[in-house]
Image: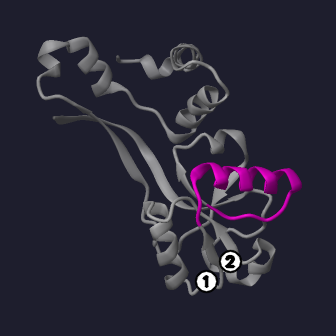
Amino acid sequence: MEVANTNLSDAKIGLVVPKYITINSISDLNNVSGKFKNKIIGIEARAGVTQKTYQALRTYQLQLDVETGDSQSMIDTLTNAITKKDWVVVTGWTPHWKFAQWDLKFLQDEKQVFGASEEIKSIVRRDLAIDNPILYSIMKNFKWNASLSASLAMQIREGVSPEVAATEFLSKNPQLLNGL
């Protein structure tokens, strides 16, 4: 195997709130913890973002609990809160379709518990350039961002087949095909 390309450079994890929430930083959570019912809505307890959330509780000395569940229960809680304009903080990551569905923001992580942005790479088998130069060229040159990825994932979530969604997506974003 070999890395053909970094196709997405702005992947990240952290704590996420709807944009209507007036705080912007993890360090602000304690000041308004009651508005969040003293909890952060997480996903599975062993997930990396959940483990980092436990670390953030210690590092920032947060007076909140992490309520773990699965990704769908986190989405359900987020959906209900947004519908009611309630305050909610969830574990989050990009790329993810929820950023195409709602106006969300990451809380600033001044202490870098969740780390900096990360990269998603295209990995191919070593001889692909020889065996299939066209496919290798696509894998080597394709680049996009978390926002575009989220919009494509949102279409598929809404029931569009991956093949149709990809075709429509590329017709709306022809710049992604430049150089392929």
- Is residue 70 inside the magenta stretch? yes
Quarter containing the C terminus: top left
Task: Write down the quadrant of residue 15 in the picture.
Answer: bottom right
Residue type pointed to by label 2: Leu
How many labels were placed on the picture? 2
Give the left or right position of residue 78, taking residue 156 as reference.
Answer: right
53 lies above or below 178: below
Q: Secondary structure at mark 1?
A: loop
Residue 62, labelled with which disc? 1
Give the left or right position of residue 7, taking residue 49 as reference.
Answer: left
Q: Secondary structure at mark 2?
A: helix
Q: Nearer the viewer, residue 173 or 150?
A: 150
163 lies above or below 108: above
Residue 25 locus on image (x, y percent)? 64, 72
Stretch of the chain drawn in magenta:
68-90
Residue 24 locus on image (x, y percent)? 68, 68
Residue, x 73% and y 56% (percent of image)?
77
